[in-house]
Amino acid sequence: MSRDIEIFKTVLESNQNSLKDEELAFILNTLEHYQDQSIIHDLWKMILDHNHTYRHVLEFINQNPDYTPLIKTFLDKKFNLTSVEDILAQINILLEISPNLIKNRYFRILTIQKTANAVREASDLFKAANAVKAFQATNLDVDFSKLKDRMMVYLEIALVDKIELKNITLNQIEAYAYFSTGRLTENVLKDNQNINKYEVLKVLQQLFHTPVVSVGVALQPLSASIREELREVLKNVLRNNISKKYFQHILAAFYDEKGSYYYPQLFAYMSKNADDQQMLSFIKWIEKNLQHDHHYHRALKAYLKSHPRSIWKNKSARKELRMISTNSFRKLVKEVESESAGTVFKFFKKYGVQVSSVLFVTLAVGGGLYFGYDLLADKKNVESVPTTTKAAASEQVKNLDLNPFKEWKSEEPFVFHVNGEQQEMIFGQGNPMGGKSLVLTDNQNIETPFDLVINAEEVSPFDEKGVLKEGFSFYHTEYDFDVNGTLEVVIMALSQTFESFVWVYSPISENGSVGLRADLAVKGMSDAKLVDNTLKLLSDQGQSETYTYINQQFVKQ
């Protein structure tokens, strides 16, 4: 080997200004012979020290793609870098020595891949991306424009891959818009998750960077699942950015695709994230800029009258609301004034004031009342449907083996026993079609209301009126998870598409009164299976989830 190296060095040193064909052949044959050995790097280093020979060898390889493997090892070594700045500097060094490298396909591929990967792995994603966007070849004889365009496309793919929609900020949306090429396609992205993410980012860019854009037009091309994801992204982005500048964007988060909005969830969201002055400005802005319908007036009335954070409780805000001059709003204000005073009285007259402290925390919305600060969900709900439609949904799943669950009809109470005493539970409080409020009646005819909610998800099988959504049916059963002789109460809402909501309650006795302790509330994509001391169902991602009942509580396995 040492003899070959000496000959190789001699050939290089004897040809400072020209290179004969047989000498070029010797150099290429030597590179080919040692291309899989570490000495190849020393050979290339010697070639680099002889500029004329280096250019000649490189030009020959560029013109003869079959010889590309000879330069591959050399370029891999040169690009064995991690930071964007180092990679970009190396590109310029190589192009200064050999401008014709721009013609080498492997060089172009490596340049694109290495810069994109460096951006993807950078601690500051957008700083690294900015370095690539600002890069220019220092060798003015090199036309770098086409390669730069491809680098930017793959840079954008790296951004799409790394951006987390659930944590995205307004600054990141603005930065992404700055780097967007508008040339990404499904074929380029390939990964389905990134395709969906790109669709959301593209609409965010339109909403925040296009002077006039119709929400309906922006959302129309998206699938239902992507539209829902976009709504959640907008809600997260704007929670800490409530201002008049973004009122239109907040509305977009609650657009119902029928030309209207999910107003109850909209007011719930605003009441949770806006202060009184912001909420007042929002209501005024809607009055001035939005064409109203009866859904809006009904939701606004419910918010002003009943929500714990209602600005109606603020004297100065109430005064300004009374000054809004439109006839419809004046009428709404009069209705709120006349109806708001008797709400609490009506509730306690119906249910009494002796509600146990153990059960009080489970009280939620019933008959339009609010008993907590975060009770209105801001998820999408659909219009309520008649019982005949729900019966049809039940017909679709009647052949399934739902044992031990039994279908629960709203007109029939669910009867069970605690310590030998009969208890009855009904749903559809004040609404014979069924609702999210349960009423437990013990053997002393004391009624206690409950609310079926999935706290962590802020989703529900019920619409804004507390009526089961179209396609859902209600089921119940008793099951002794810990085999202690006391049966737990299991309630399930199941849709035709197998979307499910499951609640488990344990009967408890306190001071002679019977109540229910909420042990579990989960959402899934299958009916619940009760096996030994476990409850099993498929998650939204299609994975099996198991909840094991241990020491009077459920533990997710």
Image (cartoon, rainbow, N blue to C red):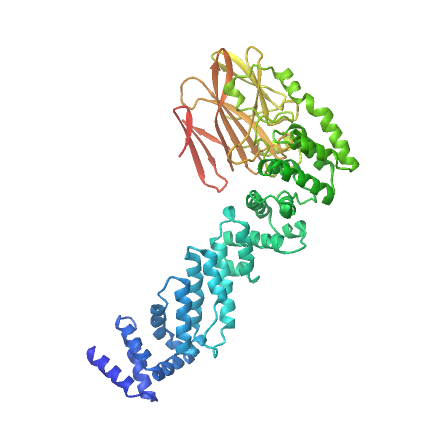
Q: How many marks?
A: 0
Front-most of residues 491 and 295:
295
The residue at the far left in this view is 2
Position of residue 289 in the picture relative to residue 506 (left or right): right
310 to 350, vertically: above or below: below
The residue at the far right in this view is 327
Q: Residue at x 37, y 62 (%)?
A: 82
The quadrant holding residue 543 is top left
Q: Percent from the top left, x then y, of residue 193? A: 50, 51
Position of residue 38 in the picture relative to residue 110 (left or right): left
Q: Residue at x 39, y 74 (%)?
A: 94
Residue 402 is at least partly visible in this image: no
The quadrant holding residue 89 is bottom left
Tell me the quadrant of the picture where the C terminus can be found.
top left
Q: Percent from the top left, x then y, of residue 431? A: 66, 24
The residue at the far front in this view is 316
Q: Percent from the top left, x then y, of residue 523? A: 51, 35
292 to 511, vertically: above or below: below
The quadrant holding residue 394 is top right
Residue 303 is at least partly visible in this image: yes
Front-most of residues 422 and 16:
16
Position of residue 504 in the picture relative to residue 255 (left or right): left
Front-most of residues 545 and 112:
112
Tell me the quadrant of the picture where the N terminus can be found.
bottom left
Q: Percent from the top left, x then y, of residue 143? A: 50, 76
